[in-house]
Amino acid sequence: MKKILILLFVFTSTLAFSQNKNAKATIEVDGVCGMCKERIEKASIKTKGVKSAVWNVKTHKLKLIYNEAKTDLATIKKNIAAVGHDSKDVKASKEAYATVHGCCKYRDEDVRKAHKNDNDK
């Protein structure tokens, strides 16, 4: 009986320490401008467990610090999609995408070209 209790204690303590409270991840999120940046970062930060979210307009990389015990990347991506932005494996619905400002329509080739020229200056 004593051996079983020790094994249970070891197993549960291993599980408790296996989740990182300051996990770091980088994901690619589609967007084109500063308004997109604000929207993406806000949706990320509003996700319970996300401590830091910084999106780069030029690289489209979102750098995250989050608590794995409270959230995961799938949840963060879902919340970003809910405000109209795509990641590689979670796409925003047509309804969510329709809510983004006209200059933020990153799926439109002309908008992407216009912002590329703006970012190159």
Image (cartoon, grey):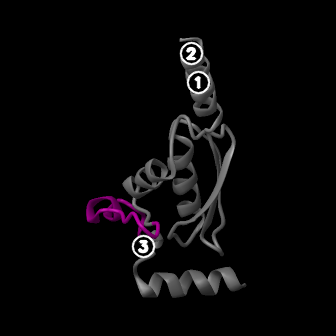
- Circle 1 — which element? helix
Horizontal placement of 85 versus 32: left or right? left
Circle 1 residues within 10 Å: few <14, some 14–19, many ≥20: few
Mark 2 vs 1: CB contact within 8 A: yes
Residue 5 in which image quadrant: top right
The x and y percentages for residue 107 are 40, 78
Question: For numbered disc 2, what is the local secondary structure?
Answer: helix
Between marks 1 and 3, how big is the CA–CA gap? 55 Å
Magenta portion: prevailing SS class: loop
Q: Which residue is mark 3?
A: 105
Residue occupied by mark 1: 7
Front position among marks 1 and 3? 1
What percent of the width, then of the height, locates residue 18?
A: 63, 38
Write down the residue under mark 2. 5
The amino acid pointed to by label 3 is Lys
**Residue at image location 61% in from the left, 38% down from the top:** 19
Is residue 116 depicted above or below 20 in this figure?
A: below
